[in-house]
Amino acid sequence: MTEFPQRRQRVASALASHKLEALLVSSSASIRYLTGYVGSNGLVLITPAEAHFFTDPRYATEAQQSIDCTVHVCKKPLIEEASAVVKRKRLKNLGFESTWMQVDTYDRLHKALGAGCKLDPVNGIVEELRAVKSTEEIAKIRASVLVNSLAFEKTLRRIKRGTREMDIAAELDFQMRMAGAEKPAFETIVASGPRTALPHAHPTSKQVLEGELLLIDMGAMLDGYASDMTRMAFLGKPNKRMQSLYKAVLEAQLAGVAAVKAGVAAGTVDAAAREVLKRHELDQAFVHSTGHGLGLEIHEGPRVAKKQTDKLKAGMVITIEPGAYIEGLGGVRIEDTVLVTETGCEILTPTSKDLVLL
């Protein structure tokens, strides 16, 4: 028994509160969440009574065998076939995901339905459901996290003085796949020396040298679910300034983790990490949010950022990743994937947060 019918029913139950008769879902992650479909061309139409899935003939066999709602294999553009169903059902109000629908697709939808059906831009209906993970989803994220950490450990053994950032990134990606990952969850970040002050540095041909920091931010995608982790290493022995910077960020990260609990506002977790860095006079060096949700996408709700009032719920999976970046010196970021519980959180990332000395 899959979870997909129950997920679609929850969406259907939410339509009335948004004053919608139906919802057209075009986000690939949300389509996968509702049907299990992993192809490149699909749409889902949900009404209070039923669900329709639309795809093209390339995915006909797969869809008909695996998707447990009404399947339409379309020779015309999917939006036209979906519009035909809307008209057949005489729906007068249709929600669509304005964040995901392209203008051209919207124009086709509007033209096909005409004045008989009002189009309402909505967002967040499916995403709000996706934010709280089921037991099955949590198990998949746990597995993804373990694959990610294993790839990190195996790659560390191959890093030495003179290794290029791009070679480390390639090895991390290779080890993820060897451990079973479908792909990296995002473009692997590897930066060394002063380049660690760039929060989202792209790996280059720069070599890792003696006396330099090394920042690795990586995630695996396994069975559709993402993981995310950042760890730091140092080639040689760090001086007192480097040690002080690392200890400050680690203290902030631990404070953020300690603040996580069901019912706590996401902004409160961000504030806990930020307050520590402020005490160390590093608040101006913290230039991004403390974390984000993850699941079928690497960035999902909730945002763990300043002034975010959304309350954390048990079953959410988020990252805690404060950082401090000093131009000319370098930057430190430490990141775990954690599961929100009623009494606190469970750190899913097994990798030690000690500064790795290479």
Image (cartoon, rainbow, N blue to C red):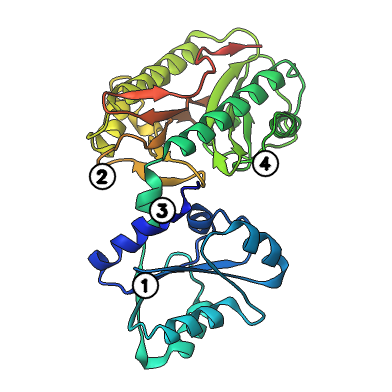
Tag in front: 3 or 4: 3
Q: Amino acid at mark 2?
A: Asp
Residue 257: name its quadrant: top left
Q: For the point 41% across and 21% down, which residue is it?
A: 249
Q: Position of residue 129 (x, y in %)?
A: 36, 50
* Residue position marked by numbered label 2 in the rendering: 310
Q: CA distance from mark 2 to mark 3?
A: 22 Å
Residue 292 in the image: state x and y as whole percent. 41, 40
Q: Nearer the viewer, mark 4 or mark 1?
A: 1
Q: Residues within 10 Å of mark 2 (few under 14, many from 20)?
A: some
Q: Earlier in the sequence, mark 3 or mark 4?
A: 3
**Marks 3 and 4, how far apart in space?**
26 Å
Q: Which residue is mark 4?
A: 183
Q: Which residue is denoted by mark 1 in the rendering? A: 22
* Residue bearing mark 3: 7
Residue 125 locus on image (x, y percent)? 35, 59
- Please provide percent x and percent y for residue 69: 51, 64
Q: Nearer the viewer, residue 116 or 241?
A: 116
Marks 2 and 4, the one that precedes in the sequence? 4
User: Which is nearer the N-term, disc 1 or disc 3?
Assistant: 3
Mark closer to the chain start, 2 or 3: 3
